[in-house]
Image (spheres, helix red, strand yellow):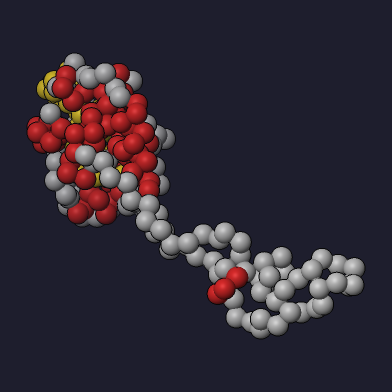
Amino acid sequence: MEIAVVNINGEDTGRKVSLSDKVFGIEPNDHAIYLDVKQYRAHGRQGTHKTKERGEITGSRRKIKRQKGTGTARAGDIKNPIFRGGGRIFGPRPRNYNVRLNKKLKALARKSAFSYKAKESSIAVLEDFSFEGAKTKEFVSLLNKLSMQNEKTLFILKENDKNVYLSSRNLQRTLVTTCDELNTYDLINAEKLVITEGSFERIENLLG
């Protein structure tokens, strides 16, 4: 599969990039995608949630009323979970949400995501570019020229470019990343992938 390379003005450069079947043409594995996205989202959880249980509440252990004859349910101390201000029953405790996956499965998930985007014709190839300064206005102009101003886009650069990253940071529906920082969640979440021309060799080396 070949895709035409466009410049930052949205014009065809006359060059084409051939997509590797080993990365962009495999039979997608949905379960691998699910596991990799699950790991990505799990790693975003701090796991520091905590509520106080009965033994951790400050208060007297004195029995607050007699056992029988009150006409109401029996009760122990003021820290009883059925009372307001009492302990929480089976409340959340700090825990580790990390999920471990091997490298081959993670690579399969990313290749599956790329293959889905290739089948949907949701990949655009942009010649390598940079900005002289960090200006959001320039990035918005680029999106308009590519006719992607209303779509959720993921720009994949060969290497980190501070000006390009800072120019896109305030745009809610646009994300800029590098080949080395790719993850399956961002690939699947984007409606359009904009890959710079020099990134393909790096992507194929990492995943192929």
Question: In this view of the protein, can residue 198 be seen by the observer?
Answer: no
x 32%, y 32%: residue: 33
Q: Position of residue 49 (x, y in %)?
A: 47, 62
Q: Is residue 74 left or right of residue 208?
A: right
Q: Quadrant of the N terminus?
A: top left
In this view, the residue in front, 171 or 70, is: 70
Judge whether 136 appears above or below 36 on screen: below
Please name whichever residue, 18 or 74, is drawn nearer the observer in this view of the structure: 74
**Total marks placed:** 0
Q: Residue at x 55, y 60 (%)?
A: 91
Give coordinates of residue 46: x percent, y percent.
39, 59
Q: Position of residue 80 (x, y in %)?
A: 68, 70
Q: Residue at x 82, y 66 (%)?
A: 73
Q: Can residue 83 be seen in the rendering of this structure?
A: yes
- The residue located at (16%, 19%) in the rendering is 21
Location of residue 19 (image quadrant):
top left
The residue closer to the viewer here, 76 or 105, is 76
State the quadrant of the C terminus: top left
In the figure, is residue 82 to the left or right of 12? right
Residue 108, position in %: x, y?
23, 30
Farthest residue, direction top:
1
| Residue 7 appears left or right of 82 | left
Q: Is residue 58 left or right of residue 189?
A: right
Q: Nearer the viewer, residue 138 or 63?
A: 63
